[in-house]
Amino acid sequence: MRLVVDSNILFTFFWKNSAFNKLSLKQELNLFSPFYALTEINKYSQEIIKKAKISEKEFKILKDELANNIEFISIKEYSLFIKQAQNLIKDLTEYEKNELLNDLDFFALALKLNCPIWSNDKLLKKQDKISVLNTKEIISLIDN
């Protein structure tokens, strides 16, 4: 199963025994994320280190491991889908649009790859063009 993984799901890779940590190693999952997500991981590294209760050295090791399990895609490869991604949120409220602007890369990449997004963000499900699956739904699909 091919999935585009959002940043908040990627953050949980650093938590010991997280569902994502276990699922990301499954052979039947092909995981993708915009390169932008790595920038977010670096931006929030201190917060991740604190919440995951790991050292900076462990963080760097885990980040390398994450990069080996996820294919990070350059914006050049999905930039043609950004406009289409913007159209997905045009019918939402201004507040919802503003909240989802940061997620356009994930929508655009999902459009390019023609696959669902793995996210626990309920707001992403407010559009109906791209399937958005939460962790519980992913587990259910894999266990069947």
Image (tube, grey):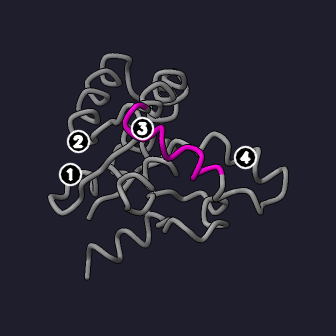
- For marks 1 and 3, give the CA distance: 19 Å
| Residue hosting label 2 | 69
Q: Secondary structure at mark 2?
A: helix
Q: How far is the residue under mark 1 from the one under mark 2?
A: 7 Å
Distance, label 1 to label 4, CA atoms, is 30 Å
The x, y position of residue 143, in whole percent, is 26, 77
Q: Earlier in the sequence, mark 2 or mark 4?
A: 2
Q: Earlier in the sequence, mark 1 or mark 3?
A: 1
Q: Secondary structure at mark 1?
A: loop
Q: What amino acid is labelled 4 in the image?
A: Glu
Check the image and name the residue furthest to the left.
Answer: 27
Q: Is residue 26 left or right of residue 72?
A: left
Q: Nearer the viewer, residue 133 or 140?
A: 133
Q: Earlier in the sequence, mark 1 or mark 2?
A: 1
Q: Which residues are magenta?
A: 76-86
Q: Which circle's residue, 2 or 3, is located before the other in the chain?
A: 3
Magenta stretch containing residue 84, yes or no? Answer: yes
**1 and 2 marks in contact (CB < 8 Å):** yes
- Tell me, yes or no, whether the highlighted magenta stretch contains residue 99: no
Q: Which residue is mark 4?
A: 99
Contact between marks 3 and 4 (CB within 8 A): the answer is no
Name the residue furthest right.
94
Determine whether the residue tagged by mark 4 lies in a helix, strand or loop.
Answer: helix
Q: Which residue is mark 3?
A: 34
The label on residue 25 is: 1
- Find the distance from the CA under tag 2 to the CA under tag 4: 28 Å
Picture coordinates of residue 50 (x, y %)? 51, 27
Q: Evaluate if marks 1 and 4 touch, with contact meaning CB atoms under 8 Å apart.
A: no
Q: Main secondary structure of the magenta part?
A: helix
Q: Is residue 78 left or right of residue 121?
A: left
- Residue 104: x and y in percent read 58, 45
Instruction: Work out how far the residue at label 2 is from the one at label 3, CA to CA, in angstroms.
Output: 14 Å
